[in-house]
Image: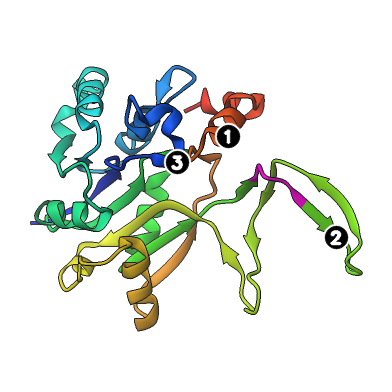
Amino acid sequence: MKRIFGAVILCGGLGKRISEFTNKISKPMIKIQNKPLIGYILKKVLSSKCSNVILPLGYKGEIIKRYVKKEFKSHLNRIEFFQTGKYTSVSNRIKMVKPKLLEYESFFLINGDTIFDTDLNKMVNFHFSNKNLLTLSYADTITTWGSFFLDKNKNIKKFSKNDRIRYIKPQNFNLNGYRNSGISLINSKCLSNFNFNVSDFEVSLFNKYIKKKSNIMLYNLKLKLWYPIETINDYKAFNSNKELIKKLKKI
């Protein structure tokens, strides 16, 4: 009998955009307030009803493995490590752990560079109650680069940084765009006839089912905290934000 759901935390990439750290450690091991990113993520996932967590290790994966074995030793029966190669794409990492993922009805796919605080079990309930093949989630974006605010006559009224933006409007499209949170729930059936020889796993998989108009829904995570650490500026901005640090301590 299949278990209801598991999780994959993507943690094998090279992290070239934040090489100030990744020359020595893998990106998920970057410390925020003296704790690695992977530590915050694992704590949230393990606090859910998730059966098992899969870590497809790559670049400097042994550092992650040592840390997890030491800090989460009471949960090692729920954590599995897979050596998936230093230069392996996300798509091929998923392909390599596919046999394990097929043991679950659905699985979380979670980015390993983002701190978040939300109730994952609520997303699971939403996913299964709607019989979704894909449940995608979005997050408000913090505009660290700054934003110009205009009135209806296109007069500039304000410039500021660190504003929270719910959605964006792309040019030439009468659509609203929402920021992918990096947390999705995928029915394992979606992997059965998937071509893993693609450049971007999420783009290919998500658009495949969007085009089919299959059971795919967008879910509001109602995040208490969400912050990706993609560049050195993200790292500095987080550590200088007292409000974010206060929220982080509640995780």
154 relative to 34, above or below? below
Write the residue at 29% across / 40% down. Answer: 11
- Find the magenta span and give its range: 143-147
Q: Earlier in the sequence, mark 2 or mark 3?
A: 3
Residue 214, image quadrant = bottom left
Q: Amino acid at mark 2?
A: Leu
Residue identified by numbered label 2: 150
* Left or right of residue 182: residue 11: left
Residue drawn at x 39%, y 76% is 210
Q: Residue furthest bottom?
A: 212
Residue 144 screen position, x and y as percent:
66, 42
167 sits to left or right of 71: right
Of residues 138 and 63, the one nearer the viewer is 63
Residue 146 inside the magenta-drawn segment: yes
Q: Which mark is residue 233?
A: 1
Q: Residue at point 37% right, 35% down?
A: 41
Residue 63 at x, y = what percent? Answer: 24, 25
Whole-Å distance between the Cαs marked 3 and 1? 10 Å
Q: Amino acid at mark 1?
A: Asn
What residue do we see at 82% from left, 55% from top? 149
The mark found on residue 17 in the picture is 3
Q: Which is nearer the N-term, disc 2 or disc 1? A: 2
Cα distance between the residues tagged 2 and 3: 32 Å
Cβ atoms under marks 2 and 1 closer than 8 Å: no
